[in-house]
Image (cartoon, rainbow, N blue to C red):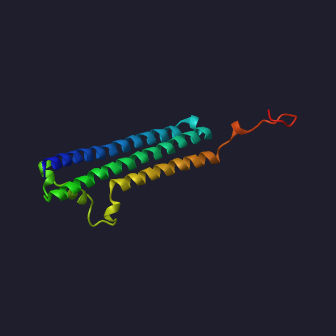
Amino acid sequence: MEVDDLTEYKQCLESWRFFVGLRFTVFAFFLTLTSALLYVVLTNSKFEDSLYRVLVSLVGLVCTFAVYIIEVRNQHLYDVCCNRAKVLEARSNQPDARKQAQPDSITLACAVQTATRRGSLFPRQFLTHSTGFFILYLVAALVWIGILCGAICTFKPAIFIFVIGSKGTAV
């Protein structure tokens, strides 16, 4: 590998590691936020009122979609770094390109390719962190939608009812 390619390759690897770590950090934040909101909604007596449950479930749903958007962006940047490193490995025609960048390690292309289990019931494309994250984000969104629907069904719109006076006019 040329010096410029090797420098770029090292930067790709550093960025790739950063985005892998960032994905798990964002996911840990999401799980903490969701768990805290669910705990408050399901255990606090104030949230027996449907209006509060509607508001908190809307906040939870918006947070779920916002964090999922961040996850998709991080995944895209992760893939860009990984693909660029693979191009640099292919251009160098050296299977040990990563060893020049970091001794005692294998190439990125080989690491990504062998990271999934062989011989399982699911296709290799399904056995990824991205698929697992997507399933958990989907479950969280469905939980928030369930709480929202339950709260709407029991909602007593006292603040939206007009009190009718004796003359038949809204007071």
Which residue lies at the image location 60% right of the left edge and 45% below the top edge? 151
Which residue lies at the image location 35% right of the left edge and 51% below the top edge? 76
Which residue lies at the image location 61% right of the left edge and 41% below the top edge? 50
Q: Is residue 72 left or right of residue 38?
A: left
Which residue lies at the image location 20% right of the left edge and 47% below the top edge? 8
33 lies above or below 2? above
Dividing the picture into quadrants, the one containing residue 94 is bottom left
Residue 104 appears in the figure: no
Position of residue 14 measured from the top left corner of the image (x, y, whole percent): 23, 44
Dividing the picture into quadrants, the one containing residue 122 is bottom left
Position of residue 44 measured from the top left corner of the image (x, y, whole percent): 53, 36
From the viewer's side, name the closer residue of 30 and 80: 80
Position of residue 22 measured from the top left corner of the image (x, y, whole percent): 32, 43
Residue 101 appears in the figure: yes
Q: Residue furthest top?
A: 171
Q: Is residue 7 left or right of residue 161?
A: left
Dividing the picture into quadrants, the one containing residue 130 is bottom left
From the viewer's side, name the closer residue of 86 and 26: 86
Position of residue 137 measured from the top left corner of the image (x, y, whole percent): 43, 50
